[in-house]
């Protein structure tokens, strides 16, 4: 038996070989049906060039603007969100930047599938009667493929940034616009394309890691739906529907039943039912029932709008065509009406004490604070469905007054889970990283006493926060034993009748300290207190993952 070299990616080669063989088989069978001919009649050389150019644009922004070239898994994100109209750089870049590799690849895969279908639906060659190819710039397939499609992509991306609700990031608004445009002509094929998106994603991950070994272990993360910018996706979808209704107005119209079924499934697959809000301090609420109602309302609106656009009837002397177009424009106007006051505000003012330890990196200020007003959500205060924008947050706060940035970059709960995190700040052509660590002791039957440190780019550490002292629930000889974080380290504190009777330094490993008749011994990661013959484990060193 021939041994396979360890360096040979046998499984990856097998994936590619079987995929190519399957595609060639389908191509061979479909030659008789002329699918290849149809593709070449719609697309220049049968290739969706505009989609490919758009992919290169997004990938280039990730590599060279966000510094993904040098830090593939840790790009600079904070300065490239759409923080405010007063910060043009964020508005210009947010639709084309991403918060990590998974976010990037997910949107690029969606672009490959949905962008190709949308570009095929529109085509590089004019379909209007009497219009000849190359008769004008609009009829030139090279202009349509390499300029018009990427140009529309850039415009749609900028619109999703301008009318975003808060500091969004990512190309998904444009991906949803691709879905909307394709849906106008091919509602059920758009459903198939969304399913194909999942298959392409699986193939991509299989090429990366053909064999995955995993085990059950604790993890930290917000609910997957809490990262979805539903309004941004909805804006992109309606922009695509509007473009499609105009650009494909002379094409054959699918039945209303196809469109309704397709709209329900597409809205479900695109998670437009995920209507959610956050309550601060890593708590979120999902209105799933309301979201399902919204899907059916949305499907009815889309179906009716696209249907009446193609009728010549009038309603009280108003053309149904105009009413249908207005129905597609109306959600865009509503989203924009809400977005404008949000984006005119600034989150630079807050209630963080001025004397709090802070690291300054050019125009950024990085600090740690707890239970402060979240200026990212409370620029405009209002309440709805029992929720409010006036929420509190705890964690590493990144601020920049010139950039109008205020964001909890690392939450208190995430830091308590991991014990260590990194925050990347920067701008065009530069980046710096700040490390944050947490050390703490968990007291028996009670909370955790801890300290938080920030490390400057120069390598020096600064203590950014220390909690109040925490005492173990059990008592010895009527005294409570607690851990008291101080400037120079952790100390032990003994209290009796709410009065401090002793403060002792934290013992080193396998040593003990005594005070007020109580001895506390440190055994590796445990603190054991004893009085006469009674011993209690009063605290454990906080562990992280």
Image: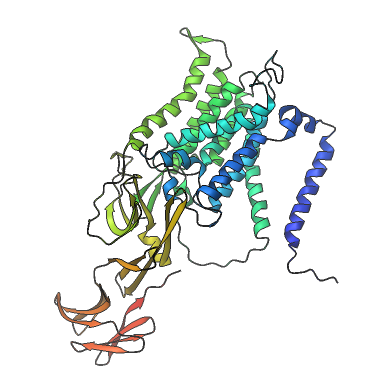
Above/below status of 123 relative to 269: above
What colour scheme was applied to this rendering of the protein? rainbow
Q: Position of residue 495 (x, y in %)?
A: 18, 78
Whether residue 514 is visible to the viewer of this picture, yes or no, is: yes
Quarter of the image where one finds residue 176: top right
Whether residue 191 is visible to the viewer of this picture, yes or no, is: no
Q: How many marks?
A: 0
Q: Position of residue 259 (x, y in %)?
A: 60, 28
Relative depth, front residue between 514 and 47: 47
| Side of 356 relative to 144 (left or right) | left
Above/below status of 262 relative to 321: below
Relative depth, front residue between 298 and 235: 235
| Side of 234 relative to 496 (left or right) | right
Relative depth, front residue between 228 and 36: 36
Quadrant occupied by the N terminus? bottom right
Above/below status of 124 relative to 350: above
Which residue is depicted at the point 68% across and 56% down?
Answer: 207
Which residue is depicted at the point 45% across and 61% down?
Answer: 220
Q: Position of residue 357 (x, y in %)?
A: 27, 62
Q: Residue furthest bottom?
A: 532
Above/below status of 351 relative to 337: below
Quarter of the image where one finds residue 291: top left
Q: Position of residue 91 (x, y in %)?
A: 43, 39
Q: Residue furthest top?
A: 317
Which residue is depicted at the point 72% across and 31% down?
Answer: 44
């Amino acid at each position: 038996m021939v041994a396979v070299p360890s360096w040979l990616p046998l499984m990856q080669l097998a994936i590619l070989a079987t995929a190519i063989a399957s595609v060639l088989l389908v191509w061979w069978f479909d030659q008789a049906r002329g699918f290849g001919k149809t593709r070449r009649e719609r697309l220049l050389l049968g290739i969706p060039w505009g989609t490919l150019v758009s992919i290169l644009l997004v990938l280039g922004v990730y590599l060279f603007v966000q510094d993904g070239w040098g830090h593939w898994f840790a790009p600079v994100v904070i300065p490239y969100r759409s923080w405010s109209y007063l910060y043009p750089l964020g508005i210009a870049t947010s639709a084309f930047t991403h918060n990590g590799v998974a976010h990037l690849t997910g949107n690029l895969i969606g672009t490959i599938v949905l962008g190709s279908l949308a570009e095929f639906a529109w085509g590089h060659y004019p379909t209007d009667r009497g219009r000849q190819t190359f008769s004008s710039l609009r009829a030139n397939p090279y202009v349509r493929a390499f300029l018009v499609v990427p140009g529309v992509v850039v415009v749609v991306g900028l619109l999703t940034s301008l009318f975003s609700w808060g500091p969004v990031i990512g190309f998904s608004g444009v991906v949803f616009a691709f879905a909307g445009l394709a849906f106008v002509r091919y509602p059920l094929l758009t459903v198939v394309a969304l399913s194909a998106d999942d298959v392409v994603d699986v193939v991509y991950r299989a090429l990366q890691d053909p064999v995955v070994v995993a085990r059950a272990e604790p993890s930290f993360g917000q609910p997957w739906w809490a990262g979805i910018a539903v309004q941004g996706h909805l804006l992109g979808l309606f922009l695509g529907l509007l473009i499609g209704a105009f650009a494909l107005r002379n094409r054959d119209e699918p039945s209303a039943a196809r469109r309704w079924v397709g709209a329900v499934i597409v809205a479900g697959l695109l998670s437009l039912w995920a209507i959610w809000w956050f309550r601060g301090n890593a708590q979120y609420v999902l209105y799933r029932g309301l979201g399902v109602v919204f899907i059916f309302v949305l499907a009815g609106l889309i179906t009716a709008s696209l249907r009446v656009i193609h009728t010549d009837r009038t309603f009280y002397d108003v053309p149904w065509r105009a009413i249908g177009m207005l129905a597609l424009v109306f959600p865009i106007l509503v989203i924009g009406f809400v977005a404008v006051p949000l984006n005119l505000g600034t989150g630079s003012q807050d209630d963080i004490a001025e004397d709090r330890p802070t690291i300054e990196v050019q125009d950024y200020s990085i600090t740690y604070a707890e239970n402060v007003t979240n200026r990212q959500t409370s620029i405009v205060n209002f309440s709805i469905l029992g929720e409010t924008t006036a929420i509190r947050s705890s964690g590493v706060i990144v601020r920049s007054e010139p950039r109008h940035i205020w964001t909890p970059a690392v939450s208190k709960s995430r830091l308590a889970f991991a014990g260590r995190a990194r925050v990347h700040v920067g701008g065009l052509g530069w980046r710096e990283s700040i490390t944050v660590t947490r050390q703490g002791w968990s007291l028996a039957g009670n909370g955790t006493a801890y300290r938080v440190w920030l490390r400057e780019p120069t390598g020096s550490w600064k203590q950014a926060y220390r909690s109040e002292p925490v005492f173990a629930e059990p008592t010895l000889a009527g005294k409570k034993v607690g851990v008291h974080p101080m400037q120079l380290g952790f100390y032990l504190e003994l209290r009796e009748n709410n009065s401090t009777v002793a403060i002792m330094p934290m013992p080193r490993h396998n040593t003990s300290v005594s005070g007020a008749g109580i001895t506390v011994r440190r055994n590796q990661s445990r603190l054991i207190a004893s009085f006469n013959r009674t011993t209690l484990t009063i605290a454990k060193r906080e562990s992280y993952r």
